[in-house]
């Protein structure tokens, strides 16, 4: 397909500071829900969601779990060094594996106060894990790439245990506040399972056990995918040509059960959050990659979906190609990565609807929303502002239909 010319100024809007939700509401499902279908706009609450979804809907959630990715060390001089975990480097780049490692690990990081951290200097901290005092050390092994090697003195303790015991919740920078004790549970979906995200899939923060019970009673189906959200999700677009914006690679994990549900689905498929959308659309393009004979590695490059093709396979053909590969390899889970960039001109292949919060001006996520709403996105956002909706991660929700 031909990539349209996009002017980033068309995706900016004025977001007053006071409209950014700095803290979550007391009850998750009491947030507002802006329901947009065709030319109809309804102002609801999230607890109304089961009423507006048809019984044959399939909801797809991202079950990633946020890790307290902000680690704080102090030099002997007293200087505070902040290390933010981004992507694993060694001994594996696979997030679920490195979180369970019980020996030294190396991560790509962001480092606060890096100039005060001397080459070869070990930063040390005492951490209590399950009643044991553990010595955790950090060494800057590659300053240019901000690679940090972590080691500890107990081979029975996994890296995830150290992070959970000592790390701080990695709140989005636009909240401009320190995390509180309540953020540990509230900046996490109630269905989070697989540790590895450094940002929450925030569309899912509104769900409660009561909402799930009502959805299930109505017969609405559920499926889970995993995309470990990276810090790149907060990165504003700075490139004049948006195609030059770097899309950080994010790791994906999808089960056979989920793929079979997607293949069998006859009604609407609704993604919970932009992370679920990126995962589902990446899954489709992986099947296309297999059918086109472009290798078996599940890795979707930023603009793979925009390559010129005479014919694009159907959703069912794409998913069946993936299942055939899984049958051949006798696996029930596939691991992959994606940089997929969704912007106006893109055609969704896997979903009919999206549950999502309200996003930052001039961001990749606004571009993704505009692929659903078209030029109406600005009108919808203005209506939300005029009706006192709360914006961004801890803000209110919307249900948008393609």
Image (cartoon, rainbow, N blue to C red):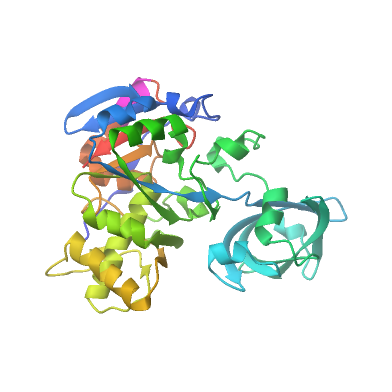
- Residue plotted at (55% across, 29% down): 23
If the image is split into quadrants, where does the N terminus sit?
Answer: bottom left
Does the magenta run of residues contain 383? yes
Viewer-proximal residue, 108 or 29?
29
Whether residue 246 is visible here, answered yes or no, is no
| Of 231 and 152, the residue lying toward us | 152
Residue occupying the far right of the picture = 76
Horizontal arrangement in the rendering, residue 148 relative to residue 21 (left or right): right
Tell whether 372 sits left or right of 124.
Answer: left
Q: For residue 227, which quarter of the picture? A: bottom left
| Secondary structure that dominates the magenta span | helix
Figure check: 294 above or below 313: below
Q: What's the residue at 31%, 47% (across, down)?
A: 368
Using residue 327 as the reference point, say whether residue 315 is left or right of it.
Answer: left
Coordinates of residue 387 in the picture (x, y in percent) = 35, 20
Q: Is residue 116 visible?
A: yes
Q: Quadrant of residue 108?
A: bottom right
Report the number of numbered marks. Answer: 0
Q: Dividing the image into 4 quarters, which one contains the C terminus?
A: top left
Instruction: Return the x and y of residue 44 as percentages of the image width and height.
Output: 32, 23
Residue 20 versus residue 60 in the image, above or below: above
Magenta residues (range): 381-387
- Most extreme residue toward the top, as rendered? 387
Residue for point 36% across, 30% down: 214
């Amino acid at each position: 397909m031909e990539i349209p010319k996009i002017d980033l100024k068309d995706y900016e809007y004025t977001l007053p500071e006071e409209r950014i939700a700095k803290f979550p509401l007391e009850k998750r499902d009491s947030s507002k829900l802006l329901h947009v279908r065709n030319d109809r706009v309804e102002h609801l609450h999230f607890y109304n969601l089961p009423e507006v979804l048809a019984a044959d809907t399939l909801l797809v959630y991202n079950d990633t779990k946020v890790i307290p990715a902000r680690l704080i060390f102090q030099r002997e001089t007293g200087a505070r060094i902040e290390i933010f975990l981004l992507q694993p480097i060694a001994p594996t780049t696979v997030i679920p594996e490195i979180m369970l490692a019980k020996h030294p690990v190396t991560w790509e990081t962001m480092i606060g106060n890096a100039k005060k951290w001397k080459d070869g200097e070990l930063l040390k901290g005492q951490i209590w894990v399950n009643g044991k005092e553990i010595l955790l050390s950090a060494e800057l092994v590659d300053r240019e790439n901000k690679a940090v090697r972590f080691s500890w003195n107990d081979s029975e303790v996994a890296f995830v245990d150290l992070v959970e015991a000592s790390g701080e919740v990695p709140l989005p920078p636009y909240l401009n506040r320190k995390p509180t004790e309540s953020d540990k549970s509230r900046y996490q979906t109630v269905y989070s399972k697989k540790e590895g995200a450094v940002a929450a899939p925030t569309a899912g923060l509104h769900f409660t056990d009561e909402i799930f019970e009502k959805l299930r009673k109505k017969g609405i189906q559920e499926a889970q995918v995993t995309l470990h959200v990276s810090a790149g999700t907060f990165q504003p677009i700075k490139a004049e040509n948006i195609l030059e914006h770097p899309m950080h690679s994010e790791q994906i994990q999808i089960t056979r059960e989920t793929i079979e549900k997607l293949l069998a689905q006859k009604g609407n498929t609704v993604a919970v959050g932009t992370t679920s959308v990126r995962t589902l659309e990446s899954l489709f393009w992986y099947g296309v990659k297999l059918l086109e004979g472009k290798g078996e590695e599940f890795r979707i490059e930023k603009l793979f979906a925009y390559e010129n093709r005479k014919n694009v396979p159907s959703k069912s053909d794409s998913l069946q190609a993936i299942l055939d590969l899984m049958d051949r390899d006798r696996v029930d889970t596939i691991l992959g990565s994606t940089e997929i960039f969704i912007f106006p001109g893109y055609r969704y292949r896997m979903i009919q609807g999206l549950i999502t919060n309200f996003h930052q001006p001039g961001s990749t996520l606004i571009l993704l929303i505009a692929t659903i709403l078209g030029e109406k996105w600005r009108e919808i956002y203005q209506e939300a502002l005029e009706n006192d909706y709360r914006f961004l991660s801890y803000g209110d929700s919307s249900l948008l239909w393609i």
